[in-house]
Image (tube, helix red, strand yellow):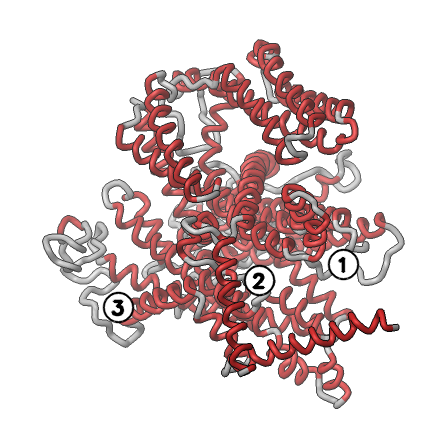
Amino acid sequence: MSNEQTPNSDLDQQMVDLAEVEDAKLTSDQKSYSQNQLIRRRFFSHVPAMISLVVLTIIAIVAFTSVGYGIIPGWWQHPFRLPRGAELVNGGQPTMFQDGQIFGPHPFGQDGLPRDIFARVMRGTQQSLIIGVVVAFVSSVLGILVGAVAGYFRGKIESVLMTLTDFVIVVPLLVIAAILGNFVREMPFAPFPLAIVLGLATWTGMARLVRAEVLSLREKEYVSAAIAMGASPWRIIIKHMLPNSIGVIIVNASFTVAAVILLESTLSYLGMGVQAPEVSLGMLVSQGESAINTRPHLFWIPGIFILTITLCVNFIGDGLRDAFDPRQQRKGDRRPGLRQILGLRGFAMSQQRRDESVRTAHAQEQRERSE
Amino acid sequence: MAYDPHRPEGDLPTVLNYIFKRFGRLFLVLFGASLLSYFLVVHSGDPLQDLRESTDADAEYQMELRAEQLNLMLPWTDQYYLPWYERYWDWLTGVLGCLDPTDSIIGVCDWGTTINGGDVTAQIANAAAVSLRLVLIATLLAIVLGVLTGIISALRQYSVFDYSMSFVMFLFWSLPLFWAAVIAKEYLAIRYNDWMADPHFAPTTILIVAVLLAIAIPTIIGGSSRRRIATGAVMFFYTCTVMPFLDHIHFMEQPRLGTGFIAIAAIVLAVGFTAMIAGIHNLKVLYCGLAVAALGVVSYFLTWNLMRGAESYLLPLGLFLLTIAICLAIGRIFGGYAKGQATAVTVLTGILISGIILLDHYMYTWPGLLSAKPRPIRTVGASTPNLRADDFWVVSLDQLTQLWLPTLVIMLTSLATYTRYTRSSMLEVIQQDYIRTARAKGVTERTVVLKHAFRNAMIPLATLVAFDFAGLIGGAIIVERVFGWNSMGTMFITGLSNVDPAPVMAVIVFTGGIAVLFNFIADILYAVLDPRIRV
């Protein structure tokens, strides 16, 4: 018996030590955070996402204020449609950084008619952003509805809904989007009809994700408790399941925005999306394509705008995913500094140094406590 | 991605039952999708629009002609004549006839006719072959490159390579496909053709390439800062000597690999694969690999005349299969206790040496192609019409030059999927308990990465490929359009703008069929690969 006594008491002593260390950590770390605060903090410390957020905000503000929206006028002097008595300035080439001026009258140049490209690109950016957001909203609502109903009620409803989802998934997205886009090409209030039908084509991914999430949440105790207390299925879905799968929903929706902006520009490039006289970035690319040698800015500028917007949205989505799902993110403590990244300082060395500093800090703490 | 909503819940008695169930579902889904899209296509516009507005005297006659072609045959009214579901039924029976080789039970295989009377059956067979080739090659390349990049990124997590690759992959992921295709067409085809008129490297070009390589290669290889600087310097001077040398021997007009290069490459491949898979100290495996390398070089000389006389792809393909068989035999017979590893090394070495030999043959053909086609990359079409050559090699190389830019563009967009997936999956697996156990047992790092981590990380790749492949077919439509290929892209776009269901439905059934088929294969593969999945 005495043989077993010694390691046990050793273990007890160790546990006590460990608990003390944990206590020390807790007391030294004054603040504690709620789940939402943690998510927010993780998101705001994600550098690429933050840079993208700033860039995207600037692009959105400039796009909407410069040419105005609807009846609200903008501060830019040229309209995006051909104005009466427009003159070709500088041979249509961009006046940005030319002859000592920063912007000049037509910073992005003019096309053959001549229309101001800056105004057109800004208008196209507006359309892209509107379509991205509206489609993400429509497809999310539809996808959540289908996924939640299928996942919660199961049985016949589930198999019917999921078979329906498969019908849509099987047809390539571009194909179904083009067919649906063909339906609404002459409808008023562009680009909203297009955005809504694109939403009808892109909900399948969200439906599958939400269904999987709901299937796993069904087995949780709090759902059983809610059922036992007589909550209705809708209450359980809305109050318990959706808030708990909000991470998946938000992340997927943000990636949908980027995918849809690409999809819309592709459709418009093929002439099946946004129709003239409305402007879209994809349409601008297809108009500028033939002039790639004589007026390369007509082709490059709208393309770069599409790329920048989708890149920013994707980075924000990545940041959101890291924030909601810290399991995927292995940053923070183990992330090395710039010098290690450049290979100027070894990994092992920095690890050792940090361990040492932690150890000395602990030792110091212990000393202070004993005194 | 890895999960499937329709996996049966209970334990079915056999795998076969499961496969049958999935197969039945495959048809159900295809049928539903075709019904849905037929309805949408037929109602997306008025096929007689242009004739209704026409002022031609015989507009009415043309309308009737078109109505006949579109299967709208009923007495003239202002409406569609046949209801859409009857048209769908006619179309469906025609397409189902393709499943019936005797043409007697269901009927003749018929995909309908286009609005202008073209035969869709012939068109889709041709277009499908072209598109499938494009997407298959692009997917294969993307998988190989993406998985390699992903593994290196994961192993060097938070290195310059990792960060820059992450950014580049995000860039590719966000790239508008049509825009990239136009850029590729303009700069990699037209400007390249201009340059090929008098191909010489300018000193500035050499310097830029040298500097880029001197930065890129050390970040991939890694190591201490001294080693990085050394590799960078070696790379810089190497490029600065090799590029003028290539220029001097007119490599761009008459490229050849040469026996020396092939021999060295074969040995390096054999030794490299041995070091990677079995460890260089495993002499049994090393000898097997070197034997294959030696055989490869010998067969290069022996088959030279045979290969030059090839008339179709059958001969190179047959020789390739023979090579694989020989490699398998060498690995199995001489591998001894390390049979499995030896076979892996011999087969991989054999495949790559065959690739190098094929490359040399194509290089040998290059001057021939240049004489037949001074501007080597045409920007329109999947092959060059009226190519003044009947040599198999020239024709085949011509197809390759036409194929490579579309493949490149499609590959770039799907590269990101594989790289990001492999990276995160590897990082996930590396943290598992069984990896720690393996390390604790004293298993070497190579074995841990390749055997324990990589294999398990790659299982869900099967599902990913299925999804990605379906997406790429959509991408192929755009790229084919930009590069002016007369294939699925054109069929779909012109068909849709004419409200002509036959070609559009052909494209949908083909792409959808590919998608469900790949999903089906992925499900089966997944069940086979992952013992935790019970079918």
Q: Where's residue B360, x and y in %? A: 51, 19
For the question of whether residue B176 can be seen, the reply is no
Q: Where's residue B191, x and y in %? A: 32, 33
Q: What residue do we see at 53% from left, 19% from top?
A: B262
Distance from disc 2 to disc 1, alpha carbons, whole Å, reads 26 Å
Q: Nearer the viewer, residue B204 or B241?
A: B241
Q: Nearer the viewer, residue A234 or B321?
A: B321
For the question of whether residue B41 can be seen, the reply is yes
Quick one: SS at disc 1?
loop
Other residues around mark 2 within 10 Å, as few (<14) / some (14–19) / many (≥20):
some
Q: Which mark is residue B7?
A: 1
Residue furthest toward the bottom? A229
Contact between labelled residues 2 and 3, with CB atoms less than 8 Å apart: no
Q: What residue do we see at 27% from left, 50% from top?
A: A298
Q: Where's residue B65, x and y in %? A: 53, 44
**Which residue, given by chain and number where applicable, does mark 2 sit on?**
A328
**Which residue, given by chain and number where applicable, does mark 3 sit on?**
A67
Chain ID, mark 3: A
Mark 3 vs mark 2: which is more N-terminal?
3
Q: Nearer the viewer, residue A326 or A118?
A: A326
- Image quadrant holding the N terminus of chain A, namely bottom right
As drawn, is B462 to the left or to the right of B163? right
Amino acid marked by disc 2: Gln
Image height of B214 relative to B46, above or below = above
Amino acid marked by disc 3: Val
Distance from disc 3 to disc 2, alpha carbons, whole Å, reads 41 Å
